[in-house]
Image (tube, rainbow, N blue to C red):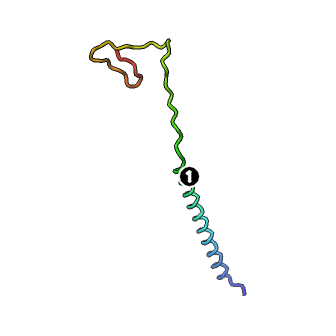
Amino acid sequence: MFSPFKLVAELISVGVQIAFLYGLAIIISFGVLAYVLISSEPKDKIVYIKVATPDTPKEVCYAIAGCKVNPDTGKLIK
């Protein structure tokens, strides 16, 4: 015989089961994503070096105590 209370109880239990499975799937997917991101090896860093060319003027410090150098540009402060 048809009972609306049993139908509502079954729908609620199915809804709870589906919500649990979706929550479990989301937790597993975040775990896999975190594992992939953490386990990936970092790429080698590329460092570009500016080579002095014959056209580049060279600054020479003749002071006995040394000369002041700008830390940002690496050029002598006069």
Residue at x 56%, y 61% (from the top left corner): 27
Left or right: 38, with 67 as reference point: right
In the image, residue 5 above or below residue 54: below
Of residues 6 and 38, the one nearer the viewer is: 38
Quadrant (top left/top right/bottom left/bottom right) for the N terminus: bottom right
In the image, residue 27 above or below residue 3: above
In the image, residue 59 above or below residue 35: above
Residue at x 58%, y 58% (from the top left corner): 29
Of residues 48 and 8, the one nearer the viewer is: 48
- Residue 73 location, x and y as percent? 42, 22
Give the class, few, some or many, for how many residues have Cα within 10 Å of label 1's Cα (few <14, many ≥20). Answer: few
In the image, residue 71 above or below residue 3: above
For residue 78, what is the image quadrant?
Answer: top left
- Residue 14 location, x and y as percent? 64, 74
Farthest residue in the bottom direction?
Answer: 1
Q: What is the secondary structure assignment of the residue under circle 1? A: helix
Farthest residue in the right direction?
Answer: 1
The residue pinned by badge 1 equals: 36
Residue at x 52%, y 43% (from the top left corner): 42
- Residue 49 location, x and y as percent? 49, 25
Left or right: 7, with 64 as reference point: right
| Identity, as a three-letter code, of the amino acid under mark 1 | Val
- Residue 20 location, x and y as percent? 58, 68
Tell me how many marks there are. 1
Residue at x 49%, y 20% (from the top left corner): 51
